[in-house]
Image (cartoon, grey):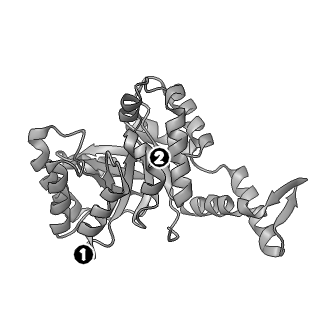
Amino acid sequence: MADRPVRPRRSLIFAPGNKPEMLPKAMASGADIVTVDLEDAIAPNHKAVARERTLAAFATLEPDPRVEPIVRVNCLRTPEGMADLLAIVEAKRPPPALMLPKIKSPDEIRVYEEVLGARCEHVRLHVIIETNEGLEACIDIARSSDRIDALLFGGVDMAAELRVEPQWEGLLYARARVVHAAASAGVDVVDVPYLDLGDMAGMEREARACAALGFTGKGAIHPKQIETLNRVFSPTPEQIATARRVVEEFERGDTGLVVIDNKLIEKPVLRSMYRILAVAERL
């Protein structure tokens, strides 16, 4: 897979596609990713209007280097999903990235690749893993396109698929498998939002557990969750200082390992150190 630029993807918030007036507020929320939703947030009879309003909003959207704007389209295996993709290809100014729901196989990603083609060569992809088929094929899905920048774990749908409650224990295997797939392809991986707005402590605990598992960020359902998510998924000053020391030691020497503070550090760790420094620089 091609090397991808590293950027913070610590937090993600949604805005409904049929209400473009909410997009500027979402862009100013502090979230790293703002997703305009054409899927779950939109009733079937409002899909066409939401699609039209969303593409009109993106045609005039001023870029902000701190925020990654995305459109979540409908599933490609539905008429609305096909209509979304064709409208995006025909748009005067297509959105910079698409979030793809309910992906089941690499073949679906290849359809997006072929239809987007050279006209939309700049359009990036963020892929939601939320079905049993998608979980089974997630490594192949993650490696299927150089357009893919992130996998997202769709925990609510995944819990229904696995016949478990949408809680940590029942979803641990699925989460770990998605992290494994993202790491194998060198892409980011974002966890499902925490749905209890009244339990900020619980959200922070789950976010820290996700970070420890390998997630690079987590979704939010309200702006008040974003500050905590950004803090949890940001490298600490201590981590940044350690990363600088490790990189300097390896670059100074010509060896496959170094010793820092009596700890043996091997060269593969450099990948994580470079990522920490790249994220820190963007922040």
Up-down relation of residue 28 to residue 118 (above or below):
above
Quadrant of the rendered image containing residue 184: bottom right
Up-down relation of residue 32 to residue 223 (above or below):
below
Which residue is disc 1 drawn over?
119
Image quarter in which the C terminus is found: bottom right
Q: Secondary structure at mark 2?
A: strand
Instruction: Identify which amino acid the numbered label 1 is placed on.
Output: Arg
Residue 9 seen anywhere in this rendered image of the structure = no
> Could you tell me which residue is drawn at 23 percent across and 44 percent down?
39
Horizontal side of residue 105 vs 49, given as left or right: right
Horizontal side of residue 159 vs 57, given as left or right: right
Q: Nearer the viewer, residue 226 or 257?
A: 257
Q: Secondary structure at mark 1?
A: loop
The image position of residue 125, as x and y in percent, is 36, 59
Badge 2: residue crowd in 10 Å (few <14, some 14–19, many ≥20): many
Horizontal side of residue 53 vs 135, given as left or right: left
Q: Nearer the viewer, residue 81 or 242?
A: 81
Q: CA distance from mark 1 to mark 2?
A: 28 Å
Q: Residue furthest right?
A: 262
Which residue is disc 2 drawn over?
190
Up-down relation of residue 227 to residue 53 (above or below):
above
Q: Nearer the viewer, residue 19 or 210?
A: 210
Instruction: Identify which amino acid the numbered label 2 is placed on.
Output: Val
> Could you tell me which residue is drawn at 30 percent across and 56 percent down?
108
The image position of residue 233, as x and y in percent, is 56, 46
Horizontal side of residue 111 vs 51, given as left or right: right
Q: Which mark is residue 251?
A: none
Q: Nearer the viewer, residue 175 or 194?
A: 175
Up-down relation of residue 126 to residue 14 (above or below):
below
Q: Looking at the image, is mark 1 or mark 2 earlier in the sequence? A: 1
